[in-house]
Amino acid sequence: MRFRAPREHEAEERAWQVVSAAYAEREPVAWPRRHVRPLVAGALVAAVVAAILSPPGRSVVHSLRKAVGVQRAEQALFSLPTPGQLLVTSRTGTWLVRQDGSKRLLGRYRDAAFSPHGLFIAATRANQLVALDPKGNVRWTLARPGPRFPAWTGTSTDTRIAYLSGGRLRIVAGDGTGDRALGRAALVAPAWRPGPGRVIAFAATPESVIVLNADDGTVLRRLRSSEPVRKLRWSSEGLLLVFAPHATRVYDRRGRVVEEDDSSEATFDRDAAFIGKTPEVAAIRAAGLGSSIFSLASGRAFFNGSGVLSQLVSSPDGRWLLLAWPTANQWVFVRLQPRKIVGVSRVTQQFGRSATIQGWCCAG
Amino acid sequence: MAGSGRDERAWVRRAQAGSASDFEALFRAHWGPAYRAAYLVVRDAAAAEDIAQEGFLAAVRALDRFDRRRPFGPWLHRIVVNRAIDWARARALRPEAEQVDAAAPEQPERDEQLLRELSKLSPEHRAVIVLRYLLDYTPGEIAELLELPRGTVNSRLRRGLDSLKERL
């Protein structure tokens, strides 16, 4: 049978754009296999992002929306469903979004983080760490080579910002003084433990995590991961989430594993986060074209869908999850109880390409 | 259509080493059969495009681990056809998604009728017929690709063909 499928050539060219982008992002890597997976996952994410504007990505949005269960898709982010404010970075810059939906472009920064009460923002650009107010006014800057991943902690009168620069973890006071280096660090965002004391978790190497008392430099815990760590987060009770796509762990204060998730060869986790101030972790499990959002502790599925969901952020009150759905150019807000799912369309048009949610913080 | 076995092994080897042009040769050689196979199973051009594209993304993911002694085509078709079957099964459960794309305008009338009737078979029957008569795999190879007993492949082929024959 001589047969040509409809629009075969056009489909080929569109697919080639996506597939070649994934190939270009890939780096030939030798064994062991566990080193291959993070790179490939990164390439796949890049390809998925590249697919945002392609017809194949858009063509399945309708059916995927049904499959995911989005009950309503707003044309824009008119408001946040619960008190708080969002920080978003994209190729356009860093945006601050208020609960009423008003948003302000703070400037062209690469990473951004809220201060403990959401009153200020720490951000990074090429060779500067910058402290901003919510109007985007620069309060101070600190010149450092290639700073990344600021994380701000403290009380209203005494705060510290941790960040990475020159392959080291550095800490500076909230007023930009007293900058010092603590130790070698891999390119993973450090995370401060909530509560009293200044305890920070950071990746010393891609596969090892150190929990450190930042005041006196005492190492409180050394943790090993079987594959490169992507993300570190603390619960309000002091549980530490060490996220890796095939080997996520939750540790208690004594360094004991209290939750673990080893996805199979065929699946991997895209992201995970504590739900609000609870010790419960929600994770995105990717399997082929589908995603499942589930509780790490109970295995309970919050929902399953055919979309490729890539980022998971909890609202400050823990009632809502915000999921990035790049292939549909949407965000999805999921209320856990009673369940409600609301989509927000046209994310790229509102925030620019490669929009990443940096934080959902306390009401400002 | 796909290049010779030697060409293909060379493309894979050089693509693994980072040659974008060889990876493109591999893509160009295999896109058509993969897309057509997916299309014939799902009868939805956009879904077929996504499925074939996902197959190639899986290929990128697994490129470093790929055993160059094995042929690339069957490996890719296995991914694509299995995903197409899953997609078609899922769609069968969603009555709102019954829309079927029109065949390409250049299809002769007889082929159009054949495609229409093919789409009425179950995804499993469609898949074995597509693999056998579009991609020219032997029943033994199909059994290996879909991880089915050979007898199951043969019976699906027989039933699928009988059903088509009755309708045509």
Image: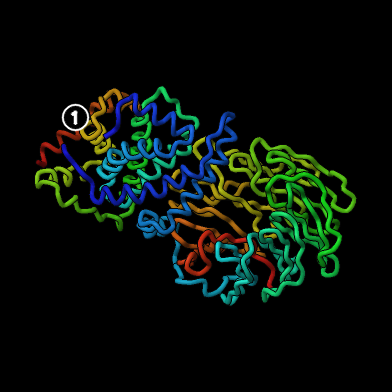
Taking the spot 25% from the left edge, 51% from the top edge, the residue there is: A7
Q: Position of residue A336 (x, y in %)?
A: 57, 61
Type of colouring: rainbow
Q: Position of residue A230 (x, y in %)?
A: 64, 46
- Relative to A71, A261 lies left or right: right
Q: Is residue B146 at least partly visible in the picture?
A: no
Taking the spot 44% from the left edge, 57% from the top edge, the residue there is: A52
**Quarter of the picture holding the N terminus of chain A:** top left
Residue B48 higher or lower than A135, as above or below: above
Taking the spot 35% from the left edge, 37% from the top edge, the residue there is: B25
Q: 10 Å neighbourhood of mark 1: few (<14), some, or many (≥20)?
A: some
Q: Is residue A85 at least partly visible in the picture?
A: yes
Residue position marked by numbered label 1 in the rendering: B158
Question: What residue occupies the far right of the structure in this picture?
Answer: A216
Q: Position of residue A272 (x, y in %)?
A: 61, 51
- Relative to B146, A155 lies left or right: right
Residue B131 position by quadrant: top left
- Relative to A118, B27 lies left or right: left
Residue A269 position by quadrant: top right
Taking the spot 34% from the left edge, 27% from the top edge, the residue there is: B7
- Relative to B66, A91 lies left or right: right
**Amino acid bearing label 1:** Arg
Seen from the viewer's position, the closer of residues A20 and B157 is A20
Q: Chain of mark 1?
A: B
